[in-house]
Image (spheres, helix red, strand yellow):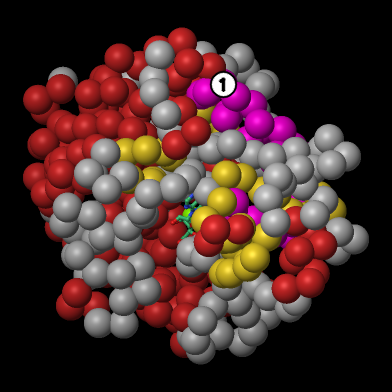
């Protein structure tokens, strides 16, 4: 990020911080926003400063309003339940000095929230942590299930709409702006073969058989903060909380935590589905989400893992064909490497589909 420490201090000065800042350092490894941790006097990490990627989230007002609605709603629910230590259980954003919930410095948009102390996020989890994460994401959806329709806007329209993602993929193929299509023709074929079977949710929605719910839409394993004892503290990364199809929130967890390899593993032998992680997550999720899920949705949960892995394969490959314009890349061909690793995971999920689908019978 091409900002000096002085620039960052000037930005932080626009928020209502009480302490003197001593350092601002990069933090986390997301593909979209820039995240920094802010240390104040006494060497205490106190805040998280984020630059919002407004090329992707181009309605920052809507984005920050959504986040405000979600965090205040959850805070109220936690207060009603008498939960202790609420500042570590829900994100707290600080207003800017002009009262807005972000600051625009003339070229970038910034926000600040409290750093949650003694917290940890993981790229890999044990079945025990996976079970806790399942409960937490189910609880998160459940707490937001009574938000009135229209309370949240779609920060990225059609974000997890598979038909829309395929349309973008087809546009990329038709234009081939970076001249990379030939190199990826066998992957394109694999995607096309599955396209029809991956648009079930959109079809069912049109037929009135599936409704939209409030979803997190980025339930990557590193978007949960745990305490030192392995209890979930908080669900974070709320940019994509919006109305959508329910399978998103199990799908992305299976795709990230339920992979024995990395999202961008170059060694495809490392990549396959981790069944104990899937089973543990599903058990936890069903504990908190069962009350609002329909039998049809319950039956489809493992399909959610295949769907989100397929969707991510399509999204990474689309970006590769487009010349790497969306996801931050850290090495040449990174999006192609990511595509191949996601596709390998998809194949493994397909091989295990019967077993995973069968696991849901206990709740049907
Ligand atoms: P990104 O869009 O880059 O994924 P996140 O909001 O998920 O941004 O933040 C990146 C990482 O920073 C998280 O995985 C987590 O480890 C850490 N993090 C973010 N917010 C907080 C917070 N409020 N307190 C503690 N750690 C945080
Ligand atoms: C992005 O922000 P981050 O890195 O958690 C992306 C997700 C993808 C993910 C793939 C707004 O998430 O949808 O699943 O990368 N977020 C957006 O790793 O596109
Ligand atoms: Mg994140």
How far from the left and from the top, in percent, is residue 364? 16, 20
- Which residue in the structure is indicated by mark 1? 73
Asked whether, in this view, residue 278 is left or right of residue 196, the answer is left
Number of numbered markers? 1
**One can see residue 223 in this view:** yes
Residue in view at x 82 percent, y 38 percent = 100
Q: Foreground: 219 or 1?
A: 1
How far from the left and from the top, in percent, is residue 57? 70, 51
**Residue 121: quarter of image:** bottom left
Label 1 crowd bin: few (<14), some (14–19), many (20+), radius 10 Å: some
Q: Is residue 301 above or below residue 9?
A: above
In the image, the segment drawn in magenta is 47-75
Tell me the quarter of the image containing the N terminus: bottom right
Residue in view at x 38 percent, y 49 percent = 118
Q: Secondary structure at mark 1?
A: helix
Residue in view at x 45 percent, y 36 percent = 88
How far from the left and from the top, in percent, is residue 163? 53, 47
Q: Is residue 237 above or below residue 233?
A: below
Q: Foreground: 166 or 312?
A: 312
Q: Is residue 59 within the magenta segment?
A: yes
Residue in view at x 19 percent, y 74 percent = 270
Q: Foreground: 177 or 40?
A: 40
**One can see residue 308 in this view:** no
**Residue 26: quarter of image:** bottom right
């Amino acid at each position: 990020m091409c900002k000096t420490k002085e620039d960052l201090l000037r930005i932080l000065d626009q928020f209502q911080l009480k302490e003197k800042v001593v350092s601002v350092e990069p933090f986390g490894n997301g593909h979209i926003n820039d995240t920094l941790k802010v240390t104040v006097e006494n060497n205490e990490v106190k805040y998280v400063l984020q630059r919002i990627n407004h090329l992707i989230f181009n309605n920052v007002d809507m984005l920050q309003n959504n986040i405000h609605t979600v965090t205040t709603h959850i805070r109220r629910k936690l207060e009603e339940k008498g939960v202790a230590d609420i500042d570590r259980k829900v994100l707290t954003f600080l207003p800017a000095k002009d009262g807005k919930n972000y600051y625009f410095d003339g070229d970038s948009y910034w926000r600040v929230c409290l750093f949650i102390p003694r917290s940890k996020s993981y790229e890999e989890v044990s079945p025990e942590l996976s079970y806790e994460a399942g409960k937490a994401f189910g609880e998160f959806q459940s707490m937001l299930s009574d938000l009135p329709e229209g309370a949240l806007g779609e920060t990225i329209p059609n974000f997890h709409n598979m038909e829309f993602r395929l349309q973008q993929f087809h546009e990329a193929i038709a234009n081939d702006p970076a001249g990379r299509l030939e190199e990826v023709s066998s992957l394109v074929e694999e995607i096309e073969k599955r396209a029809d079977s991956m648009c079930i949710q959109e079809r069912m929605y049109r037929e009135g058989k599936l409704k939209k719910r409030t979803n997190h839409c980025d339930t990557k394993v590193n978007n949960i903060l745990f305490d030192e004892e392995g209890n979930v503290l908080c669900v974070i990364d709320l940019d994509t909380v919006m109305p959508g199809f329910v399978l998103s929130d199990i799908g992305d967890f299976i795709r990230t935590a339920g992979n024995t390899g990395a999202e961008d593993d170059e060694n495809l032998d490392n990549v396959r589905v981790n069944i104990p992680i899937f089973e543990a997550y599903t058990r936890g999720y069903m504990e908190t989400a069962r009350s609002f899920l329909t039998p049809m949705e319950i039956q489809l949960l493992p399909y959610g893992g295949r769907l989100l892995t397929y969707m991510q394969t399509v999204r990474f490959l689309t970006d590769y064909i487009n010349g790497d314009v969306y996801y931050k890349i850290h090495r040449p061909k990174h999006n192609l490497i990511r595509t191949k690793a996601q596709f390998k995971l998809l194949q493994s999920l397909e091989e295990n589909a019967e077993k995973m689908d069968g696991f849901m019978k206990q709740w049907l």
